[in-house]
């Protein structure tokens, strides 16, 4: 049994996790094994985009001490900027029409306390999980009514699987697109949902005849670079610290409560 299983949808999200580990070795298609700074074993899974893929990979995954859903998300609050870190305290599953299902609680205390003790700015709050990409600002505004800070597409599956198995779960998200940003491009999807890789040819073809979309593409690319750097830096510090930073060490619960109270 692994100490931690990391679920990441996109290639750059998985890469950020892998670069923070030691002794990484491939373990099959889009699966790797490595170690935290204290020697704890970590499995990293690049699961692809969307709820169904996340459900399938979570169902196939072995038990672990902790499931960590990690990657980017879209901001739902105007004050959140690209690169801001969000630690979930609840996952709010949405359906395709934006209606909320039964929330799944996750424990943010250890990560929040560890981050605060090191002066790392994080926001703690609900993370919405949608089965469809919220392309428009209006769609984000509707999702924000449920009180979530950010929205993404995989954490509901990971948190639900963890809850059903009695496995601890944590959610770490970095803001990619901001609340006022519309996302998505004409001409079909430019991200392969199975691998999370960008189809450059399709993206170029879609944008070539629509110059009004170029500023959006440039802005999103810049925001992705900011988000990737921030996530990579945070995971590098977090994974080096070992299991206690993730709330799984022998003294982590006591230290987390003390840090939060203090």
Image (cartoon, rainbow, N blue to C red):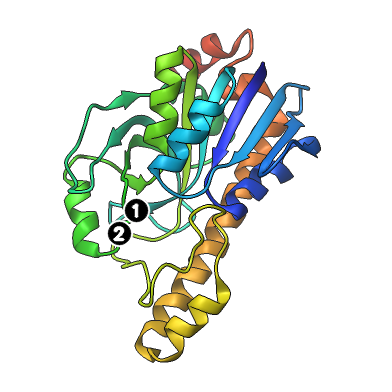
Q: Which mark is residue 245?
A: none
Image x and y of residue 118, in percent: 59, 34
Q: Left or right of 236: which side holds 170?
A: left
Q: Is residue 238 left or right of residue 35?
A: left
Say which residue appears at 58% left-offset and 14% top-offset. 252
- Can residue 99 be seen in the rendering of this structure? yes
> How crowded is the residue under tag 2: few (<14 C-alpha within 10 Å), some, or many (20+)?
many
Marks 2,1: beta carbons within 8 A: yes
Residue at 41%, 47% in the rendered image: 50
Quarter of the image with the N terminus is: top right
- Give the label on residue 75, or none: 1
Q: Is residue 65 above or below residue 195?
A: above
- Residue 216: quarter of image: bottom left
Q: Which residue is mark 2?
A: 179
Residue in front for this viewpoint, 176 or 42: 42
User: Residue 107: horizontal and vertical position, in percent?
Assistant: 42, 21
Marks 2 and 1 sit apart, C-alpha to C-alpha, by: 5 Å
Q: Secondary structure at mark 1?
A: strand
Q: Quadrant of the C terminus?
A: top left
Give the secondary structure at mark 2.
loop
């Amino acid at each position: 049994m692994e100490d931690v299983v990391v679920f990441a949808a996109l290639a750059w999200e998985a890469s950020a996790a892998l670069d923070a580990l030691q002794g990484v070795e491939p373990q099959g298609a889009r699966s790797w094994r490595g170690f935290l700074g204290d020697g704890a074993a970590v499995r990293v899974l690049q699961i692809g985009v969307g709820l169904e893929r996340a459900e399938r990979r979570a169902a196939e995954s072995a038990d672990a001490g902790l499931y960590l859903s990690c990657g980017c998300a879209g901001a739902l609050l105007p004050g959140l900027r690209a690169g801001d870190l969000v630690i979930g305290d609840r996952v709010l599953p949405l359906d395709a029409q934006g209606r909320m299902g039964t929330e799944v609680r996750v424990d943010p205390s250890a990560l929040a306390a560890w981050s605060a003790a090191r002066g790392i700015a994080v926001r703690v709050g609900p993370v919405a999980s949608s089965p469809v990409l919220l392309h428009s600002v209006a769609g984000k505004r509707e999702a924000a009514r449920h009180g979530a800070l950010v929205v993404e597409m995989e954490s509901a599956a990971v948190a639900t699987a963890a809850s059903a198995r009695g496995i601890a779960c944590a959610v770490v998200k970095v803001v990619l697109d901001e609340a006022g940003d519309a996302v998505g491009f004409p001409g079909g999807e430019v991200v392969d949902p199975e691998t999370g890789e960008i189809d450059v040819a399709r993206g170029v073809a879609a944008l070539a005849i629509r110059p009004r979309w170029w500023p959006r593409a440039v802005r999103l690319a810049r925001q992705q670079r900011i988000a990737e750097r921030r996530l990579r830096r945070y995971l590098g510090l977090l994974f080096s610290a070992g299991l206690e930073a993730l709330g799984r060490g022998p003294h982590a619960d006591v230290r987390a409560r003390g840090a939060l109270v203090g």
